[in-house]
Amino acid sequence: MSVSSERVQGAAAEASPGKTIIPPVSLRLSRTATWSNIETKPVYTPGDIDGDYDQKLGNPGEYPFTRGAFPGMYRTRMWTLRNIVGYGTAADTRRGIDMARKAGQAGFNVVPDCVSGVGTDPDHPVMQAEVGLDGCSIACVDDLDVLLDGIDPTETDVAWHYTYNLYPMAVAHARRHGYDLAKLQGSHQPDHLKYNLDGGGDKFMSPALSHRMAIDVIEYAVRHTPKWALGYPQMYNIRERGITPATEIGLGLTIAATTFQDLAERGVSVDEVAPSLAWVSAVDIDVFEEVAKFRALRRMWARMVKERFGGQDPRGMRLRIAVHTSGRSLVYQQPLNNLTRTALETFAAIAGGVQSVEACTYDEPVGIPTHEARELSVRQQLILAHEVGAARTADPFGGSYYVEWLTDKIEAEATAIQADLERRGLVKSVADGYLESIMDEYNLRREEEIQAGERIIIGLNSFVPENEPEPRRFTFDAAPVRDYIKEFTAKKQRRDPVRLGAAMKAVVDALHGGSNTQPAMIEAFSLGATVGEMSGILRLGSGMPYDPYLVLESPFDLERGRYLGEPSQIDG
Amino acid sequence: MQLGMLNFHSGYNEEASVSETGRPLRCALGMLASDKHNKGLRVIAHLLRDEGVEVIYLGEYNTARTIAQAVVDEDADLLGISAFTGNYVAKLEELMSELRKVGAGDVPVMLGGLIHADDEPTLRAAGVDAVFGPRTGRHDVLDYVRQKQAEVAGAA
């Protein structure tokens, strides 16, 4: 089913080789459906909505929380401005954090690189050139020492875009510095299943192991670090990978429901878990659809927690939402247009009543954000707060005939999707490729719409700039990374091989014995275990190879509980 | 090393139509090292299958060595790499070297993704046959692949 230019309606033509370009026509209505293909009418009237206000909407801060999680919303507490920082070594990123602070940013979100973030060490022979390119290398507790130097995690809330290895490292770090775990603040994103879904495949973690790690960390965190928040489900990556807002809700609620069920089997009630969770979402450019999505999501979450899982604590029913604006919605060509896009997306998030916002920079499609772009991104949120008045009243779109209709519509779609996925089984739907095929279909359809002119994206298939100068690129000095890698390797030999070996054996024993892996992982990380080693032994314990790249042998004798020294390379 | 065949729902034509004039083009598609943003790669895989290309989908998290070996093992006529992290020049140089080591140095390599135009001359000098950066589209890729198809069919 290939699309040729003959299929295109209207005045589209191949203006230049390579793509279908819509000739520059000034303003016209190019599409009547939302970005997720919900068809809309020219006008919505009272006849389009029904239901009782208290039952369907409620005031903000009241069940079912459609209009907002808190009564005062932004009048009581503004959303947290959290833009992400992360590149190079912990020392590089720490400097980035300090610069962001000066530019007006209050919250910190640290992004690990794609090496450490999936559990590969920076000194892996195949991966050294990748270290620190797209995030911060955080591979052992010493890296947290550098990153958090002078930052008290019981007073400053750092959010980590990091899965199962981060939490035990953070606890080990807190213990090392004598911080009270009951006061430990911060958050991370325990869901590793998203990596099985967003291009991570299962070379690193089987879906079953990914899910197990999430359950273990959630159980441990709600019991031992009550102020630590869990960005879960983390739907941003999956949304960007290729799903609609309705599927975001349907799949995310499936993840939550499955998790509540699994935790209930361990004696953890929904009231113990739900208050610590915050949904991590994307916000795309279709403003009304995203606002409707946030409203439908809050309502569905509240009803699920209360009516299905018997939750009694309103803090579990009222869903907090953390948002990152969609990177995928941004365009490489004429990147300054992305300031318009991110501003509107951020506006949609605020109108949708979220609790924290990470906005993309305008140069997101190009590479790591430059400091100038980062500053403009922060200013955007400040303009929305101070000039636009986006925060002065809760749920400003509430009562709009269109938005109430759209909220109901998205809820109906999401309900059907959730029912389907729960019937199929969450882990199974990841493992057997069903979810991946949904995303493939979405991406193909989106691509066809772009080709056919049914989805106009300025700069991409319409008003394409000619002879545009190439964008400036973010650069940073790579020498510190090389020094860091050398030291990383060297310090592995300074660890206590017996204690470390025993601690790693304890992790695998916990994995096999069905007990919570966190205590053993915390202990091992405090003895200097690295993320590559931890992920490696978890894989070995699950019958997978130690090294996904099949280059390294495990440096542990797990039977006897010994660290054997530098891992040898598999000859090949 | 895993070789996956793409699995798409019904609604899309899954049958590869073999070229009338000869055998179909065999194209391996993959990503290197920690690069995992594979939406574009999967869309290209589907488009190529629609063109009658036999796609060998290598996916993500590969080393230069395993990709080079797959090209040989699968008798690929063409290799497509998708890259988004900033060190694609070094990675492609290493890949070209590995391809030569296993005797596949004559297999053309096309590179797509977040490729900055300033890097194109270096990539071409390293031996990359075609570069499809963010300003190109599906027709550029398909025109190039059809050209390769014709070469393979002609040589059959």
Image (tube, grey):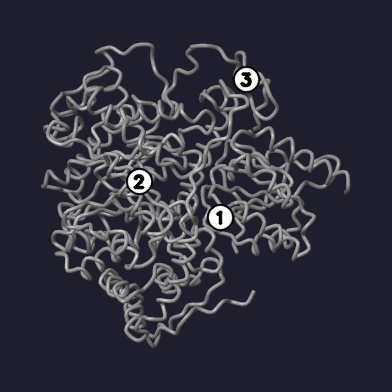
- Who's the residue at 17% across and 46% down the image? A316
- Binning the other alpha carbons within 10 Å of mark 1 as few (below 14), some (14 to 19) or many (20 upward) gives many
The residue indicated by pointer 1 is B60
User: Quick one: SS at disc 1?
Assistant: strand
Is A160 left or right of A314, judged from the image as shown? Answer: right
Instruction: Establish if A208 lies above or below A275.
Output: below
Q: Position of residue A514 (x, y in %)?
A: 30, 72
Q: Position of residue A250 (x, y in %)?
A: 35, 41
Quickly name the residue at label 2: A84
**Residue nearest the viewer, comparing A484 with A63:** A484
Q: Is residue A500 left or right of residue A5?
A: left
Badge 2: how crowded within 10 Å, few (<14), some, or many (20+)?
many
- The numbered mark at residue A245 is none
In this view, A8 is above or below A184:
above
Where A110 sits versus A510, above or below?
above
Residue annotated with mark 3: A8
Distance (Cα) linking label 3 and label 2: 40 Å
Mark 1–mark 3 distance (CA, rounded to whole Å):
34 Å
Q: What type is the residue that disc 3 sits on? A: Val
Residue at 21% from the left image edge and 69% from the top image edge: A175
Which quadrant of the figure has residue A103?
Answer: top left
